Structures are given as C-alpha cells and as structure tokens.
Amino acid sequence: MTAPSRIREISKKLIQLSLDEEGRVVEEKVREVLESLRANPPREHKLLLHLYLDHVKRELSKGVAIV
C-alpha cells in the first residue's frame, strides 16, 4: 500500500526542517519536529512517522562510508 501524496509531501517538508544549512540532520531539530507532531498529531500520524524515519535514515546514510 502506498502512502497518500499529502502524507509524503508532509514527510518531505519535515525532513527539510530537520536539516542544517549543509544538509546534515540535526538532532535538536528532529526533536522539535517530533515534539510538534506529538502536540498536534495529524491524521495517519503513524504512517507519517514511518516515512519521516525513512527520510532521516536516508539522510544519515549519506554521511556514512562503507569500506
């Protein structure tokens, strides 16, 4: 089952809010995003959180070198 486009768009915006100027994930910004979602959970929040987690993992893997 694919995610609705609205949920995918929101998850992409959330990951953009979690990055610094150099494109790295910032822990404090991630916490702020999660706190705001906890305070005002949108519809289908579980799916949104899973997509957000996937985006965060993808961004973190960009900085890891496999030798």
Image (cartoon, rainbow, N blue to C red):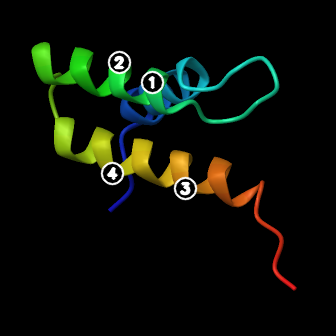
Which one is in front, 46 or 36?
A: 36
Vertical order, 52 against 20 (above or below): below
Q: Which mark is residue 32?
A: 2
Q: Residue furthest front?
A: 28
Q: Which mark is residue 28?
A: 1
Question: Disc 1 vs disc 3: Cβ atoms closer than 8 Å?
Answer: no
* Mark found first going from the N terminus, 1 or 4: 1
Residue 64: image quadrant is bottom right
Question: Disc 2 vs disc 3: Cβ atoms closer than 8 Å?
Answer: no
Which quarter of the image is occupied by the C terminus?
bottom right
| Label 1 CA crowd tier, 10 Å (few <14, some 14–19, many 20+) | few
Vertical order, 65 against 41 (above or below): below
Question: Disc 2 vs disc 1: Cβ atoms closer than 8 Å?
Answer: yes
Residue corresponding to mark 4? 50
**Amino acid type of the residue tagged 2 in the rendering:** Glu
Secondary structure state at the residue bearing disc 3: helix
Residue at the image point whose x is 19% and y is 35% from the top: 45
| Label 3 CA crowd tier, 10 Å (few <14, some 14–19, many 20+) | few
Q: Is residue 53 left or right of residue 60?
A: left
Secondary structure state at the residue bearing disc 4: helix
Residue at the image point whose x is 83% and y is 70% from the top: 65
